[in-house]
Amino acid sequence: MSREVLKYILWSLCATLWVGVCFVLPDFLDNPVHDLRSILTIALYVVAISGASWSILYLAGLNRYVAWVAIPLFGIAGAAISYFRVAFHATITPMIIDATLHTNEGTIAGVVSWQLVVWVLINMFIALALVYWRHRTIRLQYAWIHALVAMVILIGYYNAHWHLKAAINQRFPYNVVHSWIEYERQQQAIHGERSQLAYEAVALPDSLDIVLVIGEAMRADHLSLNGYMRSTTPLLDQRENVVSLPNIYSEYTYTATSIPHILSPADSLHPEWCYSYRSFIATLRENEFTSAWLSNQDNGRTYTSFIHEADTIIFPNANKSVYVFSPWYDANLLPPLDSLMGSKETRRLFVLHSIGSHWYYDLHVPDNCKHFTPLTTDRIITNNTREQVINSYDNTAVYMDVMLDSLIQRFEARNAILIYLSDHGEALGEDGEWLHAGSSLALHNPACIVWFSDKYASAYPDKIKALVANKDKRYRTDFLYYSILSAAGIEAEGDSPKMNIFR
Ligand SMILES: [Zn+2]
């Protein structure tokens, strides 16, 4: 290897060090760590993810004139994104791209501060110094061979392991491209053609509020409502008009696959219907229900078309992803709900997609709900004891109890019904399995709770009688489509006692 090549490799490693320290490390500063081992793990992540920038910088620097443009632009973008990551715990998401595209300049000007300008200038200076070094001191020959090798390394490294790829996609500069692609795919999904299941409005009420709360990773057996030894749902335990259904089966064990099956008429015989049919939101809208989707999660590609069936869509935490380790609560959904509740419409649907029991549990539970201790102390779940993980998980149930109780208070005086259904369960160390998307039994048994107001009970006594009689029966999460329409007095084609908890 010639001296010039070695100099160029050294240059590219220094450029990578810059990206690692200034743009990748900021993504990890809020990660919970509790000992040297976890600090070393994080350091390894930073190095592995920074490594994905090496070949990009290597390619960008090959032509000295391209480098003068590409490297400073790379620095400006990296500086801006890392600044927002540290100052506001905000990251690039498809929802943020959507919001940015539809935001006027005044709002953008509002987020520019002197600290941001200084950080961008510092990184501009580093970028220009790197390019100057490259331009003045290194003479490379056969650039195309270098380009070819760098391309092969780039593709090989990016695809080396799905776990590494997922982590890289969430960090600069890959997160910019990844979020753009995801945004474009969501747009395609929103504009795709879908059919609608036939239905008959048999007993449409004059006025009704339907509230659907989609839980996240809440398993049925960790609720005192279902006999769990710890008092995780003390408020709902004491409430009248609350019916828990402990035997719900979710075939799908992660959000992206389970939610389309919950919202659409897809069932075990027609699983593909979640890609070709509209949800109950469209049906309710046709029957003069105003609808709102309030989400503390993302605008997932597999269910964004259902979200966009709603009249109003609100993401109070659009700049958060599960890779952001800062507090972020479901109570953030309440202010937008309260402002919508002032509306005069008589039939209304509110869908609340909660962050619920998503890892890192402690960040989604306010301190006054942290009843069980000691809590987790490390973002790597296996660096905690099982006791710590279960404590932190159970606190998410305590907070869910508080959230549902506070929602019920808002609707108590109205003709209203609330259905809470978690998208799937969560593994808590059984057979060495943690979190979700695996195969353990607890993942398939999500929590499900129904509450109804007194007015609702007197308007639909037969439905309530059936609900109470059905409470211990086994249903697949497919029940939701038919049941929520049934709760509104609408009978969808294919409605049957197996699909409808109100029948
Ligand atoms: Zn989920």
Image (tube, grey):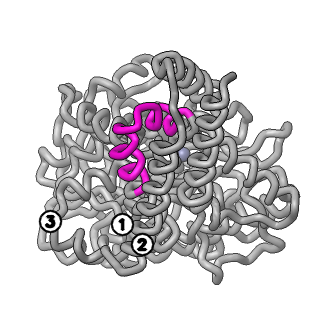
Give the structural element (helix, strand or loop) at label 1: loop
Choose between 304 and 120: the one closer to the eye.
Answer: 120
Q: Give the Cα separation between the discs numbered 3 and 1.
A: 18 Å
Q: Image point 61% across, 31% down: which residue?
A: 4
Which amino acid type is shown beneath numbered disc 3?
Answer: Asn
Q: Residues within 10 Å of mark 1 (few under 14, many from 20)?
A: some
| Image spot of residue 297 (x, y percent) | 44, 54
Chief secondary structure of the magenta portion: helix
| Image spot of residue 493 (x, y percent) | 26, 27
Give the numbered dot on residue 104: 3
Residue 226 is a magenta residue: no
Q: Image point 84% across, 39% down: which residue?
A: 432
For the record, the magenta segment spans 55-75
Q: Decide: marks 3, 1 in contact (CB < 8 A)?
A: no
Give the structural element (helix, strand or loop) at label 3: loop
Which amino acid type is shown beneath numbered disc 1?
Answer: Pro
User: Which of labels 2 and 3 is toward the front?
Assistant: 3
Give the numbered dot on residue 316: 1
Q: Give the Cα separation between the discs numbered 1 and 2.
A: 6 Å
User: Which of labels 3 and 1 is toward the front?
Assistant: 3
The residue carrying mark 2 is 332
Choose between 391 and 315: the one closer to the eye.
Answer: 315
Q: Decide: marks 1, 2 in contact (CB < 8 A)?
A: yes
Q: Image point 34% across, 23% down: which residue?
A: 273
| Image spot of residue 358 (x, y percent) | 59, 55
Q: Residues within 10 Å of mark 2 (few under 14, many from 20)?
A: some
- Choose the circle earlier in sequence order: 1 or 2: 1
Which amino acid type is shown beneath numbered disc 2?
Answer: Asn
